[in-house]
Image (spheres, helix red, strand yellow):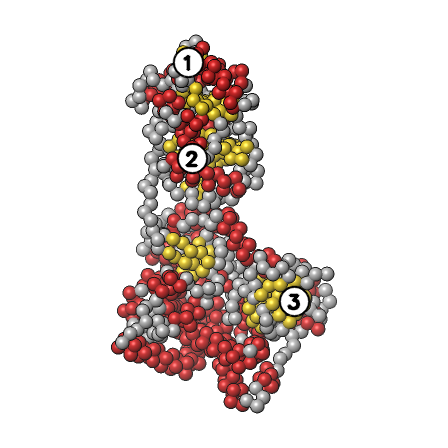
Amino acid sequence: MKYVYAMGEAHDVEHVGGKAAALARLATAGFAPPEFFAISPAAFDESGLKPEAAGDLSRALSSLGPGLFAVRSSGRQEDGAAHSHAGQFLSRLNVPVAEVPAAAHEVWRSGFSESVVAYRRQHALDANDGAPAVIVQRMVPARAAGVVFTADPVAGRRDRMVVSATAGLADRLVSGEVDGVDYALDKATGVPSAPLEADGPLSARDLAGLADMARRIEAAMGAPQDIEWAFEADRLHVLQTRPITSRLSATPLPDATVTIFDNSNIVESYPGLVSPLTYSFAQYAYARVYRAFVGLLGVPEARVRANAAAFDNMLGRLDGRVYYNLINWYRCLALLPGFASNRAHMETMMGVGEPLPADIADRLAPPRPRGLSVVAEWGRIARMVWRMSLAAVRLQGTIRDFNRRLDAALGRAALDLETAPLTALAAEYRRIEAELLDRWDAPLVNDFLCMIAFGASRKLLERWLGAEGLALHNDVLIGQGDIVSAEPAQRIAALGREVSAAPGLSAALRRDGLAAVAGHPGIRGGIDSYLAKFGDRCTEELKLESTTLDEDPTPLLLAIAAAAERPPQLERQTIDAGAKLKALFAGRPLRRSIAGLALSLAKARVRDRENLRFERTRVFGRARRIFMAMGRELAANGVIAEPGDVLMLTVQEVLGAIEGFSVSSNLEGLVAVRRAEMTRGRALADPPERVTITGAVACRRPASAEAQIAERSADTDGNGEARMGTGCSAGRIVGKARVVTDPRSQALEPGEILVARHTDPGWIAVFANASAIVVERGSLLSHSAIVARELGIPCVVGVKGATQWLATGDEIEVDGVSGSVRRHHG
């Protein structure tokens, strides 16, 4: 009779039990568990190991070699799909070779214990048939060990793995004597759901290897598994596996629908984490405004209504960051007349770093018109051109009417927000919404014409003059004078000159803030005047949670102090763009006239674009004050705990709580959930510029550690001492880099070059003291590019990984024409 079965022979459950058979199956599948053999239950009796089995055991021990051993049970129903017998049998670890026979007998006898008999009766098994086979396995000197469930046995989720780990051996962890460190991993990627503890037993690399092994074991065994494992140095061992016996959720059905999110454009308006209130306000505004936009271009109302879902979901929010939903943007653009015939040009309206994949765009785009439909399509195009031509002719009047309407809406003093109750505040918001958001005609028309005029004039000059034409395009757009975005820099420079005339005042301004100018009424008056007009133009000004300059003027005061310390030689040099235009087109008066007209139109549209965006800032500022007042009153009435909690709610939740259409009255509970989500989002690295999700967005997988590393490498790798971006403002400067991540607390020293990941209009106080600007994100019509052209300083945008590649103090050369940024040494 055979009593001992080597690892390669241990397949018959009747002789070697369930655990040994599972280990043998793993070995056959190539998972290489620590070498073992199994002793049949027939090898034992009450007195110990039967004499006739002793020789087989001795030979089997010799085959495993010297060392310590683990002696464990392997019952016939143990580790089965129905009955795991987990924790019912005895195990012995670190057993010397001489003690293996006695330890094996102890394990065999544990099958007759009262707890095993009771367990088997409870599960309708033969109570007297519990004697297990015994596994003798090479002992692993583990630095870390534990268990991994390839599905969450508590929540029943198949898309998540659960790991419990401890340093050293896992016997006390499995028995419940010690608490391990728990990790929840995304099953598809192996990415932990929370940041790892620095002193935890497992590293990110350990977890990635463990997740990979667990997925492969589950595939080999054909069902979700409960796996014991151990790391011997860097080598991962599987010690046992058994099916998960708890109830699991159903396997989800495949879903091949693709959603693509991109923030290469919108990140300038909504950088970093964005509160639920801001996101919901932006989402609503985009839906209302772009419905109006396609209506202006002649899209019938019926087609707009049929695509309501696309307009309502032009934005997405991933890990607390705002993205464009490119699929829905594309659907909305595809409604425009002539899209099928002029698709490539209209796709540029999305303003993203790269277009949609061709196969997706082909599916979404309407078919090219054929036959009589061509005539109908050209009719639609002609109507759109006619409507936009009329809009262009009437634009200045439209802008004047818009500004009058905005001044009337925002200038009303009938409602004091400090004393208004909740219902009055809600009514005030509804009024602003109806009078402004639904009548956003001037910015829409101007932005559309700006895109056309800017792009057409740039292409024209490049075709006629090459690189000189691009430089001329930048030069001519410098120094318009009446662009509101440049006014803050001009005011800061003027205040800086006044401060420089008072010895020691700039240092006092940095140190003491506004108290430093108490004895300088002229300077204090200039600061107050600045705040009265530009108090809402703060960093991240479109986020309702942002701290405005009138609440904290520190960034403005730091900029004024830096301006006061700027050497005279760093003042801007003006460029005679008209003379350059004449020189480059000498002898070609017709082309000079056409180029001059094209540039004049572009200048006007860019100017109005920036000025109208400032008016948008005023609208957002008013909305911010209304919602903050609502937060104050909701907290005063005990609906939320703190006034700032209103930022964790959506616009509809806030209005619903006031007007009575809310779904939930437990706003404090919603606030707690949202704050926890924001905290998790803050701990994560910023998601990549583009995110592609297959299936429902709520079921998306986090990027694997390897993918995140690859993404960062793609941003930071490149030419070691030179990078290329998009040149936006002419000039060449050599100076010291200053990497700025928070313009509210950081300022530039005179002559430094600003290096940032992204910027927004609130960075103007930093721009005012920069000798050049380098930005990771952005385009030719980004705010940083426009303001740099206005200030006459070189600017390069789209320099991938600039804030990782460059460090504060690096000497760099910035060429605003070619887009080159070069790092110098020595």
Q: Is residue 105 above or below residue 700?
A: above
Determine if residue 653 is in view.
yes
Image quadrant in which the N terminus is located: top left
Instruction: Tell whether 633 sits left or right of 556.
Output: left
Q: Which residue is mark 1?
A: 44
Q: Which mark is residue 29?
A: 2
Instruction: Give whichever of discs 1 and 3 has the lower sequence position.
Output: 1
Residue drawn at x 53%, y 28% as measured from the top left = 140
Residue 615, image x, y percentages: 47, 71
Determine if residue 479 is in view.
no
Residue 475, image x, y percentages: 58, 78
Q: Which mark is residue 162?
A: none
- In the structure shown, which secondary structural element does the residue marked by tag 3 occupy? strand
Given the image, on which type of amino acid does mark 1 rest? Phe
- In the structure shown, which secondary structural element does the residue marked by tag 1 occupy? strand
Residue drawn at x 46%, y 40% as measured from the top left = 211
Given the image, on which type of amino acid does mark 3 rest? Glu
* Few, some or many residues within 10 Å of mark 3 (<14, 14–19, 20+): many
Q: Which mark is residue 813?
A: 3
